[in-house]
Amino acid sequence: FVIPDFRNFCQLIDEIYTECKANTEGSVAHYIPQLARSNPEHWGVSLCTVDGQRHSLGDVNVPFTLQSCSKPLNYALALGMTGTDRIHKFVGMEPSGRYFNELVLDYNNKPHNPMINAGAIMTAALIKPTLSAADRFDYVFSLYKRLVAGEYLGFNNAVFLSERECADRNFALAYFMRENKCFPEGTRLHETLDFYFQLCSLEITAESGALIAATLANGGINPLTGDPVLTVEAVRNTLTLMHSCGMYNYSGQFAFKVGLPSKSGVSGCVLVVVPNTMGICLWSPPLDSNGNSCRSVQFCMELVSRFKFHNFDNL
Ligand code: GLN
């Protein structure tokens, strides 16, 4: 086993969970009513090792939307279909140093990276662009279903509808990119935005999310099913950008202090990858001023203070 004394390990995880539960800082996202109604008490932690050992505690079976946690996954799936060179003709790989939804492109007139909204809208445009909207959704849904090893994956239509209703900025980003000729020829703008909102509105639970993170930790092979969902190259690229750009404007500090490729979303979810060891899904809706789940960030800090999981530990 990659974690030999799993029982003892889980006890320490439980301790960290309980410590973080006491943290009542932050407030839930409020840009759409569906998220504003989130219960700030919810706190779930689930992990899965690359050899399939699992541990979960708290609210690990309550569905929540992926939101920005879908960005690295869509990027990884797009890479598998299209390859690194083609994807990066249209989106950069540099941290933006700006807010995730800022109306700004890089010096080559590309969105900075796939982890911010502009880059994620671009990534959505690059996934099976010739398919109909319905087939595109089905196609991606079936790939996500493999990431969660057939466990919980849903779609929240109310969140989708209100994302679309309250999306002035995302529309502005898409038009700004079209004005700057960023998109590949033939891109259907509104369909691409709808697709992006749909991807944000996919639902997981902490338990099924841990399997997604574990697949990333395991070179793209789902540890429960042995299914090679993502290519090795896609995983390498994705983890690299999660490491440098995954935690909004806290990404640099998070890389420094925690040193684990991670991605957070406004629903309060964080996918954390300990490469070659395990995947963790953390979920607690209250967010800090950077937009990261308060309890989840605290959990990560505690995790690396107790275990040598920081990328540059053990050198
Ligand atoms: N749906 C949100 C948006 O596009 C997702 C952003 C996020 O999780 N930060 O604005």
Image: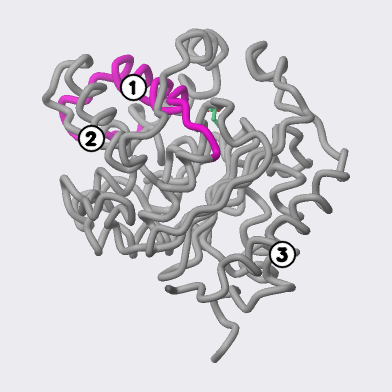
Write down the residue under mark 1: 195
Which residues are drawn in magenta? 180-206
Residue 186 among magenta residues: yes
Please state the quadrant of the image where ligand 1 appears. top right
Q: Point out the frontmost of discs 3 and 1.
A: 3
Residue at point 40%, 62% (across, down): 217
Residue at point 83%, 37% (across, down): 26
Residue 138 location (% of width, % of height): 22, 22
Residue 160 location (% of width, % of height): 47, 14
Q: Is residue 307 above or below residue 61?
A: below
Q: Is mark 3 within 8 Å of ligand 1?
A: no
Distance from disc 2 to disc 3, alpha carbons, whole Å, reads 41 Å
Q: Secondary structure at mark 3?
A: helix
Residue type at the position of mark 2: Ile
Residue at point 66%, 75% (across, down): 307
In the rendered image, the quadrant that contains the C terminus is bottom right
In the rendered image, the quadrant that contains the N terminus is bottom left
Residue type at the position of mark 1: Phe
Q: Is residue 12 above or below residue 118?
A: below
Distance from disc 3 to disc 1, alpha carbons, whole Å, reads 40 Å
Q: Pointer 1 and pointer 2: residues touching (CB < 8 Å)?
A: yes
- The image quadrant that residue 125 belongs to is top left
Badge 2: few (under 14), some or many (20 or more) residues near its Cα, within 10 Å? Answer: many
Write down the residue under mark 3: 12
Badge 1: few (under 14), some or many (20 or more) residues near its Cα, within 10 Å? Answer: many
Write down the residue under mark 2: 127
| Foreground pick, 67 / 41 | 41
Q: Sequence-wise, which precedes: disc 2 or disc 3?
A: 3
Label placed on residue 277: none
